[in-house]
Amino acid sequence: MDNNSIHGMWSSRLAFILAASGSAVGLGNIWRFPYLASDNGGGAFVLIYLGCILLVGLPIMAAEILMGRQGRMSPVNTLRKLTREGGHSGGWTVIGWIGMLAAVAILSFYSVVGGWTLHYAWLYVAQIFGGAPITDPGATFTTLLANPTTLVFWHSVFMLVTVGVVAMGVEKGLERAVKFLMPLLFLILLGLLAYGVSTGKIGQAFEFLFKPDFSEVTGDTLLAALGQAFFSLSLGMCGIMTYGAYLPRDISIPRVAVTVAGMDTTIALLAGLAIFPVLFAFGLDPAGGGPGLIFTSLPLAFNDMPFGIPYAVAFFGLLFVAAWTSSISLLEPPTAFLVEKGSLSRKKSAVIAALVIWAIGLVTALGFNVWQNVRVFGRDLQGAIEFVASDIMLPVGGLLIALFAGYTLSRKISRDQLSHLGDRGYQVWRFLICIIAPVLVLIVLAAKILG
């Protein structure tokens, strides 16, 4: 008999797909993927990326979902349950701990960056009502980073809206939020894409993104595609495992995994087709994707383009929604774990987890100004936290998930959970999860450590 999770259940296949897609779709989809594609052979990179999704992303995502659905608890307690019932070493619970701690660390700095999107949205909303225009985007961004009060304020606002959703529970909080936010994200993105088409530069953007140039493909291209495939799907931080715990038994894991990966990739490509026409139309360099592009280059175009201010509000609103849906999935694992301790309500658990993460986030906020000269591993404080959490803990967690699902978890459980694959499909999944995915994740991990 398939027991329900004590935290609640997704009401439908669509609810899970929207939630998992919201977890996967983040700031990196909008400002990192398009740049990586354009800088690594365009269509050639996209093809390699899709191959990495098939060989690494989908097998590990399916493993996380099936483990979560089998355990029906937070990642730590799911691993405890699976190892206890299977007679395996309790040491495997380290997977849950790594994932949960990585989620906490990532959300701590992600919330600060999410606060940037709110700050910029506010600056452009203010311009609609007569506020001062942003005439020097570089100086505006530098001023933001140098002001600890402003950074902490918007970091606090971002954490407040995140905990407000998680505290409401699976059905009333997470599901209601993603059913509203993900369609909203698509609508904003389509609106920005329509504007990009109106510039007359959509053809140039399409060629920039998709024209295959295999002369640009190197070993670094493969590493970039592998890394983007792994991190874009939010693997290794156990957010997908947590969401899998709320997935009804009759829903096909392979189908939802493919759908989520497809939505994640589609949004990343649409973001490129929405952003690059604007850059080309106003003579801006698309190189150097990341905060520099988003917060210093694009605002130059906003000042000159027709309807630039409403476009800017919509654009930073898009970034905020993408960051918000990801942050909800990062706060859920520690919240679920605290609820399972037995003495705290969901609301108290969410607030406690959020307060701890908010406090850790102060390190990032102050690292841009008060503690700007502090270096760890040769990096600033935000860079050090991101390196340990994203570049080390996530691939280690993903590697352990693959090894546990492939070599330790009983075949009876994995075959039953993946019954929709059929015998041949299941054998292909086992080959990928046991051999191909671990090898490729090890390559990514080694590159991050040695690079």
Image (cartoon, rainbow, N blue to C red):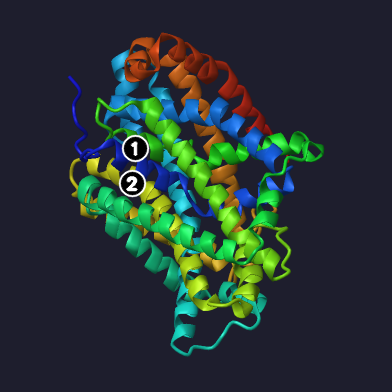
Quarter occupied by the N terminus: top left
Instruction: Tell me residue 298's x, y (percent).
Output: 62, 69
Quarter occupied by the C terminus: top right
**Residue 373 visible in the shown view:** no
Q: Report if the CB atoms under discs 2 and 1 are less than 8 Å apart.
A: yes
Q: Which residue is mark 1?
A: 242
Instruction: Tell me residue 436's x, y (percent).
Output: 59, 20
Question: Element at badge 1?
Answer: helix
Instruction: Tell me residue 444's x, y (percent).
Output: 64, 34
Residue at x-position 57% and y-position 48%:
269
Of the pair 266 and 324, the residue shown nearer to us: 266
User: Badge 2: few (under 14), some or many (20 or more) residues near its Cα, within 10 Å?
Assistant: many
Q: Which residue is mark 2?
A: 332
Residue at x-position 21% and y-position 46%:
171
Residue at x-position 43% and y-position 49%:
104
In which image quadrant can residue 254 be found?
top left
User: Badge 1: few (under 14), some or many (20 or more) residues near its Cα, within 10 Å?
Assistant: many
**Residue 298 visible in the shown view:** yes
289 in relation to 257, above or below: below
> Which residue is outermost to the right?
215
11 in relation to 68, above or below: below
Question: Element at badge 2?
Answer: helix
Tell me which amino acid carries mark 1. Thr
Tell me which amino acid carries mark 2. Glu
In which image quadrant can residue 156 be found?
bottom left
